[in-house]
Amino acid sequence: MSQTTLRSWLDERLPLADLIQTLRHKTIPHHRHSAWYYFGGVTLFLFGIQVGTGALLLLYYRPSASEAYESVQFITARVPFGWLIRSIHAWAANLMVAGAFAHFFSVLFLHAYRRPRELTWMSGVLLLLLTLGFGFTGYLLPWNEVSFFATRVGTDIATGVPIVGDSLVRFMRGGDDVTGATLTRLFGFHVAILPAITTALVGLHLLLVQRHGMSVPPSVERRSVDDPTALRSMPFLPHFLLRDLFAWTAVLALMAALATFYPWELGTKADAFAPAPAGIRPEWYFLWAFETLKYVPPSIAGIDGESLAVVTMGLAALGVLLLPFLAGHTPKAHRLILWVGVATLGFMTLMTALSLAGTAP
Amino acid sequence: MKRSLTILGLLWFALLAAKADAQTLTADATAAFEDDVHASAGLTCVACHQDQATSGEQFQTPPRTAIAPMCATCHSDATYMNRFNPQVRVDQFLEYQTSTHGRQMAAGEARVATCTDCHGAHGVKRVADPRSPVFPLNVTLTCARCHGDAERMKLFGHTAAPPADWAASVHAAALLERGDTSAPTCATCHGSHGAVPPGVSSVANVCAQCHIREAELFRASPKRDIFEAIGQAECLACHNNHKIEQPADAWVGLEEGTVCALCHDETGDSAETIRAIRRDLDLLSATMAEADATITRAEQAGMLLDDGRTALRDAREHQVQSHVLVHGFAAPPFSERATAGIASAQRAQEAGDAALEELQARRRGLAIATLLILAFLVTLGLKIRRLSWNA
């Protein structure tokens, strides 16, 4: 079948011509902040890497307390290129979280959550939470010492949730403590439930981005009134897509280098009866919350301090989710959001640094 | 008159002081007895002090020669002791009578140890209680109270070196540093209640309680008859008695400072065997050390070397068995085990080398991939620059 015949065969069955035509006419705003647009694409690319490498790992991984560690050991030591796939999966997971956070804060600081992009923002916030969920559920899967005790500490935090805290912990652990049941449960979330929800939300998010286009920051909009060169536009195809491809390729090179020179360690197998090793801490993206809880007094005005902190964090997350409906849209409100965002980012960075300094050997 | 009054005054003061001292002793003894295994069994002061005359309210300390027989009235009575613990021993006094302590005590030498010297008098704890002076971690200190006292030992014609020597031994390290309570203490080799120094002919039997295979090999070797003929205590000839150090490969050899050289030299029939054993020991150690260094280097670079580590563990196992087989004082079967160990260490080395080679291959692969990616990025960058993006 020649190329022309194949194309006409596909055109007859799929709206490819319409799609290409739409993409050719699609334009992207170009201004001094437009570099931040690429973080969304990079995060999506890393999600694709995760799906691909995760599927390959599934060929050999065995989700049980007695076999998980050995199966990861087998993947790393025996399966051809298994070390590369596992290392890329682990590094890409971390880069994806970093990319998602960069995308989140850039959208916040550029006020891209404004009408009519409320649903785009909400789906994005949910995707960020799902990304963190992927990190949490995937961390235990190698069943090594560090992940075992970090999961025990991590799930323990949920006891602070009022009323349903204990039930929530039991639900996450599949029992009173972290066991093989927890591993199986988190594996199910990691490879089935979270990917299904994420895929649907990514679809919605992309659809909404396509529907509303890229947001132009209010400051650029204001400046463009006097200086038209402050805001230009570029065709999506091929201009923006090639730039996206450039960013993806650079990330791919970075991942390959990290996987080769800093292969992800497997550590020692988890032993539920062994004492917890010193310096147990969650992954870097949870450190700020972990450290914050350490500074919370046991009781505040007669209320359990940890519960209060967990509820506050939950309300803050809800506030972030509903930000487009809660925040004003005047320049003054935008400045306030900007400073609150900067303060939050500063607080998270400080708490992470304190945690790293406190547990450093 | 004045002088008589002074003496009377001093006597009266001394009497008061003695009474106060006795009261203090009684108070201390009563307090200590509250946490005593006998008190917890329901016994009281008169259980031991029953036949003694009392002076006022003060019990008298029993004569030292009477202490062991007094303890034995209960502790040698199986029917009585069965009420408290059906598993308890009742032969301690019999053993004590066979010990150096017991025999000298029976001969009227009251300065030797009796029950209360080791177990305490009024705060006696079970042996398994970590607070007991005869708990494995404490028993050497208890023995050292007398046997580490040079002045006291001089009276009996002994040195006070054994406790300090033991403290520098592998046995002390196992007990005190690794917390291995099965490691031998004074009582393990000398006996507890029947403590005597093992004789020349019985030392090997004492060591063989734990070092079974070494003892078997030694007894099957020609050394046994030679040692018996010259009156040499078997294990002690190479290992010493109390200061038993970690054996080293360097002990084997004919050079100055080696253990073999104490009896052998280059002219003897055994010279070639000794040299062969040392050669194999050195080769095994060196091969293992080199393999370990290679594997560690590969692991630090992120490689997983479970097969290499397994081979190295095998080599270590063979090395341990080779060290045991040295006690056969013959090339085979030692050489066979050492050769197997060297082969395992070589397998570990090969695994390490393969891992390092694979690491280089990965880096070469990455370098090629990075060059290709960079070339693609440059091409992409040039293409992007050439595009006119004003829509």
Image: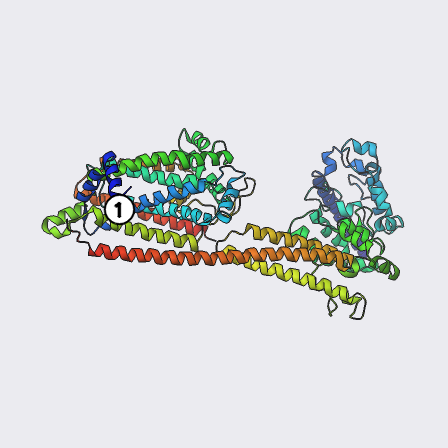
Left or right of A19 in this view: B48:
right
The one nearer the camera, A176 or B269, is: B269
Q: Residues within 10 Å of mark 1 (few under 14, many from 20)?
A: some
The chain under label 1 reads A
Q: Is residue B148 visible?
A: no
Left or right of B235 in this view: A83:
left
Considering the numbered disc 1 on the image, is that residue within a helix, a strand or a loop?
helix
Percent position of residue A111, x then y: 22, 43
The one nearer the camera, A277 or A269, is: A269
Q: Which residue appears at 42% of the width and 50% of the height?
A: A356
Colouring mode (rainbow / by chain / secondary structure / one colour): rainbow
Residue for badge 1: A106
Q: Residue furthest left?
A: A226
Left or right of B197 in this view: A332:
left
Image quadrant where one finds the N terminus of chain B: bottom right
Left or right of A129 in this view: A57:
right
The one nearer the camera, B22 or A241, is: A241
Q: Residue furthest right?
A: B107
Q: Is residue B67 visible?
A: yes
Percent position of residue A59, x then y: 46, 40
Rendered view: B284 above or below A142: below
Q: What is the number of callouts on the image?
A: 1
Percent position of residue A165, x then y: 42, 31
For the residue marked with disc 1, what is the amino acid?
Ser
Rendered view: B216 above or below A60: below
Q: Which residue appears at 81% of the width and 32% of the height?
A: B80
Quarter of the image holding residue B369? bottom left
Quarter of the image holding residue A11? top left
Q: Residue furthest front?
A: A1
